[in-house]
Image (cartoon, rainbow, N blue to C red):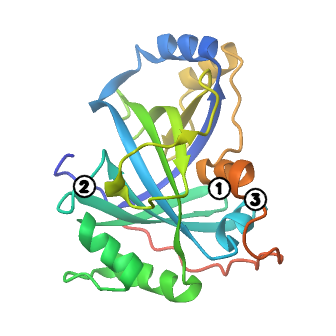
Amino acid sequence: MSDRIQCCFERYEKKYLLTDEQLEKVSAGIQAYVHPDEFGTYSICNIYYDTDNFQLIRASLEKPVYKEKLRMRSYGVPTDESRVFVELKKKYDGVVYKRRTVMAAADAVAYLRDGVLPEDENQICHEIDWFMQSYRPTAKVFIAYDRTAFAGRDDPELRITFDRNLRWRDTALDLRAGDYGAPLLPPEQTLMEIKIPGAAPTWLAHLLSECGVFATSFSKYGACYKQNLLGRGICDKPQTLQIAAVRVCA
C-alpha cells in the first residue's frame, strides 16, 4: 500500500453492471484516456458494521437523501500489524463523502469490537466514536472483490474501477481470517464504478452510450443483504437516519 494516504473524499460515484461483452468494449474504449492504477489488480476486503436489526442498510435501501455506513477495509489479507482503514462513508444529495483513519489491524479490531480507543485519536476517530455511540453497531458481513483501477490521463481525479469475483460471508468476521466467501454476483458480471468530483467528461458519456451502458443503483452490502440476510433480526421499520453535518477536508 502506498504511503500517500488520502483520508477525505468528496465526489460523485456512478455504478454500472457490465456483461462480458460490455466490459470488453468499455475497456477498449477508455484506453486512450486513462492509465492503470499503480497497484494493478488487487483484492479489497471489507467488514461492514450494522445494528442487530440491520437498521443502517435497511434505511439505505429506502434511498433517503442522506445515508451512512461504517466499514473496516484492507487491501489484501492483513496481519495484526498491517495497516487497515476504518471508514465512515456518507452520501447526501448524490454526493459521496468518505472519511477514514488508518491503524494496525489488531488495533482496529480492538477499537470497533472492544471499544479500546487508539493512542493517536484524531478528528475522524471522534466522528467514528459518535457513530458507534449512536448506533452500537457490530460486524455483520465480510465482502471482498478483485479490483482493476484506472485514473484519467488529463484528469487524475477521474477514477474508473472494475470489480470482479465479489464474494461474501457472515462468519469469521475478521479481515485477518482470509478473503474467501460465497459469490455475490454471477461470474459473467462486472461492477464498474466511475468516481469524479463533477460531471463525467464528454468522451466517457459518449462511450457509455455507444456501449449501451447505463448507471444503476447498486450497493455491495445492500445486494448482499437483500440476497442473503433479509429477514434476519427484528423486522420493525428502520428509523430515518439523522442528517449530521458532513465535514469535508481540503
Relative horizontal placement of residue 35, taking residue 166 as reference (left or right): left
Residue 250, image x, y percentages: 34, 63
Location of mark 1 (residue): 94
Task: Give whichever of discs 2 and 1 has the lower sequence position.
Answer: 2
Residue 89, image x, y percentages: 51, 63
Vertical position of residue 86 compared to residue 168: above or below: below
Task: Give whichever of discs 1 and 3 has the lower sequence position.
Answer: 1
Count the numbered circles shown: 3
Identity of the residue drawn at 83% across and 78% down: 236
**Element under label 1?**
loop
**Front one among 199 and 185:** 185
Q: Kindly indicate the quadrant of the structure image that contains residue 158.
A: top left
Between the residue at mark 1 and the residue at mark 3, the CA separation in whole angstroms equals 25 Å
Between the residue at mark 3 and the residue at mark 2, the CA separation in whole angstroms equals 35 Å
How packed mark 3 is, by other alpha carbons closer than 10 Å (few <14, some 14-19, many 20 or more), is some
Q: Residue furthest front?
A: 171
Location of mark 3 (residue): 230
Identity of the residue drawn at 30% across and 85% down: 116
Q: Kindly indicate the quadrant of the structure image that contains residue 185.
A: top right
Residue type, label 2: Ile
Relative horizontal placement of residue 188, taking residue 71 as reference (left or right): right
Task: Give whichever of discs 3 and 2 has the lower sequence position.
Answer: 2
Residue type, label 1: Gly
Relative horizontal placement of residue 203, taking residue 115 as reference (left or right): right
Pointers 1 and 3 in contact (C-beta within 8 Å): no
Mark 3 or 2, which is nearer the eye? 3
How packed mark 1 is, by other alpha carbons closer than 10 Å (few <14, some 14-19, many 20 or more), is few
**Front one among 104 and 148:** 104
**Element under label 2?**
loop
Location of mark 2 (residue): 5
Vertical position of residue 68 compared to residue 187: above or below: below
Q: Residue furthest bottom?
A: 133
